[in-house]
Image (tube, helix red, strand yellow):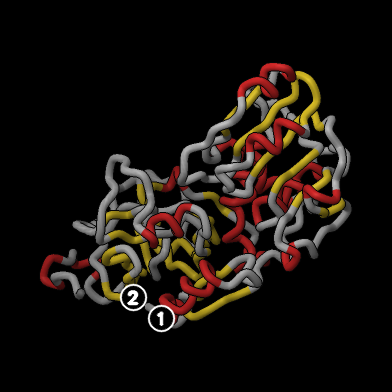
Amino acid sequence: MEMNKNSRRNWSETLTPRAVIFEEPGKLCVDTVTLDDPAPEEVTVDIHWSGISTGTERLLWTGDMPAFPGMGYPLIPGYESVGTVVEAGRDSDRKAGETVFVPGAKCYGPIRGLFGGSASRLVVDGSRIIPVDKSLGNRASLIALAATAHHALMDQAGQPALPDLIVGHGIVGRLLARLTLALGGKAPVVWEANQARRDGAAGYQVTNAEADETKSYNRIIDVSGDSDCLNTLIQRMAPRGEILLAGFYSAPLGFNFPPAFMREAKIRIAAEWTQKDLAATNLLINEGQLSLDGLITHSRAADDADAAYRTAFGDPSCLKMVLNWSNAA
């Protein structure tokens, strides 16, 4: 699926960038792509690592992603990339040599960037990237997920609203628990149905719903992705408590009204992070208050992307898969 090389701009003729391309649901390749010519406010970044999302990218992979503007195939996924700025536009406010986190890009001509970060090289607006500590290495790819967790911990006024129960001990659940402690909260209880994912806790307890008899949780954050979660969680909440849905749910959610009515339950949804969340999370990391250690369990060369995606989506022991782009350019 090689792009038309004659359409490349002179500046990129010798760069031969490569990217993960979802040609259709369940089928991908790693192939050469053509980059758009960078504008003055944009930068060119050589990507070192990109994470695989088991939420959003899984839906793109399976074809279950709900329709939204720009959706379609072929597409380049990825919004968890880390690399080095190799060319900075005069209006980009960035400089060559910076190590940066890149939350995706749309720079591939006719190929959709959803979200466009899984490539060996890309072009992106300088305002969208954020400098990171080079010593983080591939762990810097986790900043988007950490910012997502940070966003879920803020109320609508932008103030911390910390949970006493977190449902799900995947990577976002672990980041929620770590951030709760970093922001000065009490250690939350974490529920995890999968026995294999109950390890790795640091300063908090991991159990399951059956072993926990508490029925007075004031703030519950669900990141399980389980569309049938609400009735169980409503039964466990305190009067006027809140359930925050911070996972991604591909099936409709519903609940029985009388128990929710009796508790005057509040149900809220957390969307994706903002630039403010990204900056706040990066500051916590730089100050040593938030650790990203022990969260990446698997890494594969970008050219092995097909196997990497299947492992990320199918192996319960895979908490986080990261692609290494060092030899893909």
Q: Position of residue 249 (x, y in %)?
A: 51, 44
Amino acid of disc 2? Val
Residue, far left: 6
Residue 278 visible, this angle: no
Disc with the residue nearer the chain's start (1 vs 2): 2
From what the image shows, is residue 157 above or below residue 4?
above
Residue at screen point 76% across, 50% down: 191
Q: What's under tag 1, amino acid-wise?
A: Asp
Q: Quadrant of residue 16?
A: bottom left
Which residue is at the front of the view, 89 or 253? 253
| Mark 1, secondary structure of its residue | helix
Quadrant for the N terminus in the image:
bottom left
Q: Please give left or right for residue 245 compared with residue 125 in the image.
A: right
Dot 1 and dot 2 residues touching (CB under 8 Å): yes
Quick check: 278 left or right of 163? Answer: left
Residue 205, position in %: x, y? 86, 52
Residue lying at 60% horizontally and 40% vertically, measured from the top left? 246
Query: Residue tagged by mark 1?
Result: 303
Q: Quadrant of residue 18?
A: bottom left
Q: Residues within 10 Å of mark 2 (few under 14, many from 20)?
A: many
**Residue name at image x 65 percent, y 72 percent:** 317
Q: Position of residue 59 (x, y in %)?
A: 42, 55
Residue at the spot 74% in from the left edge and 19% down from the top edge: 263
Bin the neighbour count of mark 1 within 10 Å (Cα to Cα): few under 14, some 14-19, many 20 and up. some
List x then y, in percent, for residue 76.
34, 61
Tag 2 residue: 30
131 relative to 291 in the view: left or right:
left
* Position above or below: 201 against 166: below
Disc 2 is placed on an element classified as: strand
